[in-house]
Amino acid sequence: MMLDLEEKLLADRDGRLRSTLIADLLELQQRLHGELRQMNSRSRYLELQGAIRAATAAVQVLQTLNVPAVSGQPVKSKNSK
C-alpha cells in the first residue's frame, strides 16, 4: 500500500511538488531555528531539536528521491510487487 504523498510524488513528472515540499521544509527549518534561539524550557528545546532533525531528514529524502522526472527511469515502490 502506497501513501497518498508517495503516489503524488511518483506522479510529479515535472518536480514541482517535490520542489514545493523542499522549499516548505527549508522554511520550517528556519522558523524552528529561530524559535530554538529563544528562551525555552529544556523539554521544548529538545522538541525543537527533534523537529529540526525531522525536517532535515525529510529534505534529504526528497532531494535523493528517485523520481522519473529526475532520473528518467521508472520508479519501483518498496511496497509494490
Image (cartoon, rainbow, N blue to C red):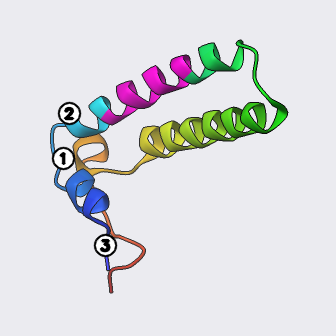
Over which residues does the magenta segment extend?
21-31
Q: Name the residue under label 1.
A: 12
Q: Nearer the viewer, mark 3 or mark 1?
A: 3
Quarter that holds the N terminus = bottom left
Residue at left 30%, top 38%?
18
Residue at left 80%, top 29%?
41
> Looking at numbered disc 1 in the image, what kind of residue is underneath it?
Asp
- From what the image shows, is residue 71 above or below residue 32? below
Q: Earlier in the sequence, mark 2 or mark 3?
A: 3
The reply to whether residue 74 is visible in this rendering is no
Q: Hey, which quadrant is residue 42 in on the image?
A: top right
Q: Name the residue under label 2.
A: 16
Cβ atoms under marks 2 and 1 closer than 8 Å: yes
Which residue is nearer to you in this view: 54 or 45? Answer: 45
Disc 2, SS: helix
Distance from Cα at disc 3 to Cα at disc 1: 15 Å
Disc 1, SS: loop
Q: Name the residue under label 3.
A: 2
Q: Hey, which quadrant is residue 49 in on the image?
A: top right
Residue 28 in the image: state x and y as whole percent.
47, 26
User: For residue 33, which numbered disc appears in the image?
Assistant: none
Distance from Cα at disc 2 to Cα at disc 1: 7 Å
- From what the image shows, is residue 53 above or below residue 41? below
- From what the image shows, is residue 51 above or below residue 79? above
Cβ atoms under marks 3 and 1 closer than 8 Å: no
Cβ atoms under marks 2 and 3 closer than 8 Å: no
Question: Is the magenta region chiefly helix, strand or loop?
Answer: helix
